[in-house]
Image (cartoon, grey):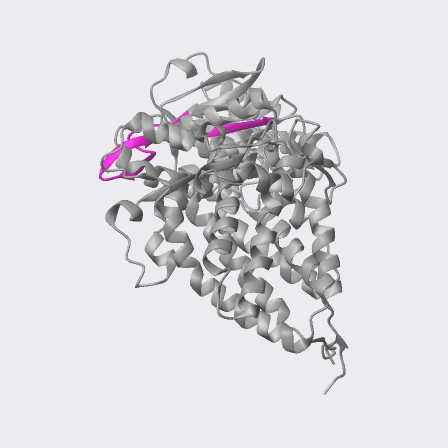
Amino acid sequence: MADGRELKITEISSICSTLEQILRPGFGPNGLGTMLTTSTGHVMVANDSWTILNSLTLSHPVGRMITDSVKNHLKLYGDGGKAFILIMSKIFHELSLSEITKDEQQDLIRSLNRLRDELPTVMKDLISECTSLDLNSSEFTSVKEHCRRIIMIQLSGSFPSVISEHLCSILLTLIFDGLTDVMCLLSVILDAMNNFDICCIEAIGYPPTSSQVIEGCVIQRTFQTIAPDLSSKSRIRFLLFSCSLDGDVQDDRATYSVKNESSLHAALMSKAKIIELVVQRLIRDDIDLLISSVNISRAVSLACHAANISTIQMVDDEEMARLSKLFGLIPINLLHEYLTDDHCPVGMVSGCDYVLINGHKFIHLIPNNSDVFVKQDKKNLLIMKHILVAGHSRGACCQIRTVFQNCLKHLHKWLTSDTQQILDDKNQALDEHQRKALLLTSCGTFELFLYFRINALFSSADRANFIYACKLISRALLQVPLALQNNSYHPVAKTLNVCHILKEASGKNIAKLQINPRSGRLIVADYNNGAEPLVPKVIMLYNMLDLVVQILRLDKLVPVQLPSKS
């Protein structure tokens, strides 16, 4: 058996501390952005945990284990990565200072597992303080306001307030416009998540305030040729091409061997004949618009214009792929196949014209409401919409896209999570009120409540090891409100410590406390400062405890050499 080196707590503490130093400045509504360099050399400023952790390359296997665990949580819930790291860092920092033995480490593992099993008791007390939502009886405006609060707490740490408000209104428009029955809210959110890559379009080089929701599809090109009556048509048939329209019909060649005047004349006549065949076929198929990913020659564009057919050329491959998915079309990549196939699929929209975005013209395809829709309870409640995400750079657009996706994940988990299943305890019987979608005030309410409740319930436990584990976790939870204080606007709050938090909390209702994101002071919880679903917070805590136990079980790091290919 290969000899390995012993894994020390100080190593793990150092790794967590490094991750904390990277993520901590960006924590909370007033967090700072982190400047990253992409693989293409572009500079990107990001605030979300997923983008930052995904950009890191860690050589230590435990470091990779930690980041992978956080990213797996973020894939499902979209948020909680920074709190995950803050709490873990404090736990291993405390353990590194205590210099526990191997036997004490095993006792700690058993105590942490016991604490995890006891958490449902604590959570039930917290559930009774949450705001519950029942879609069956809730008013439309009330549900929309809850969604706005959840979205704003996600956006506020990444963008200035003006931009956050604008982006929030865009996401609410995407979700709620055309929604007449609040019971279909979950279906709309799920559809937006599943089709986000299709319905989200990046507009690089424009301010974020140019972002908007557009019914239909936008192509970031202008018409090469446009028929005079195109904008007035109520039905427009179009084709997608990824090949030359004047190439050879046999093998799609676009080059000819020209040695003299007669061969030049023959080549030109051959091209003219091909163009004539193509235009005749387009007229026969009643085509109004050609969309091509390659250059359309002047001869083809003139022939199409004469036949009252509009053309769009040099469309990006990404946009062609999106159009292909959206309308269920396969781009034609061999000209002779189109000329010989009598059943070539044709796309159809109800309108096509220009749309102005920050003073620039883009092509706007308006879908047929009867052809493109989301089915919800057998009703066509949501026609096709697109989010146009604008940013000064590709990195800025990517940041907005990521935050939008995180918001949708958060809303989805808020509406779908079964609290009884999360508690995983049949003895913890919840009434119907407590099973509904639960919402909690943000800015440290969850962590402050757990700190006081864990200490109150288990301070007189029967075993000293279990009391130590409870104190270890409860102290680590206070890192979240402390980080919110340090990142607040008020200069005095940046110097406060845990003692100030505990002193201000004395004699107050522990279930209704939060950190004011501006002043950094402890205040009575207010949903106007932001709200977040309860279940993702609980899952984050469970995942974090599982990871701590998993790491504490590690004894040695054994290098393993992969077998050679020979």
Residue 65 x %, y % = 64, 62
Q: Which residue lies at the image location 56% right of the left edge and 54% below the top edge? A: 474
Q: Which residue lies at the image location 32% right of the left edge and 25% below the top edge? A: 141
Q: Quadrant of residue 484?
A: top right
Left or right: where 440 falls relative to 518: left
Q: Is residue 297 above or below residue 345?
A: above
Left or right: where 348 falls relative to 90: left
Residue 324 x %, y % = 46, 40
Number of disc labels = 0
Front one among 167 and 308: 167
Q: Quadrant of residue 348?
A: top left
Q: Which residues are magenta?
A: 366-390
Q: Which residue lies at the image location 33% right of the left edge and 28% below the top edge? A: 142
Quick check: can you spot residue 242? no
Check the picture and name the quadrant holding the C terminus.
Answer: bottom right
Residue 381 sits inside the magenta stretch: yes
Residue 36 x %, y % = 73, 40
Check the picture and name the quadrant holding the N terminus.
Answer: bottom right
Front one among 428 and 379: 428
- Main secondary structure type of the part rendered in magenta: strand
Quick check: can you spot residue 482? yes
Front one among 390 and 242: 390
Q: Is residue 321 above or below residue 384?
A: below
Residue 13 sits inside the magenta stretch: no
Front one among 405 and 123: 123
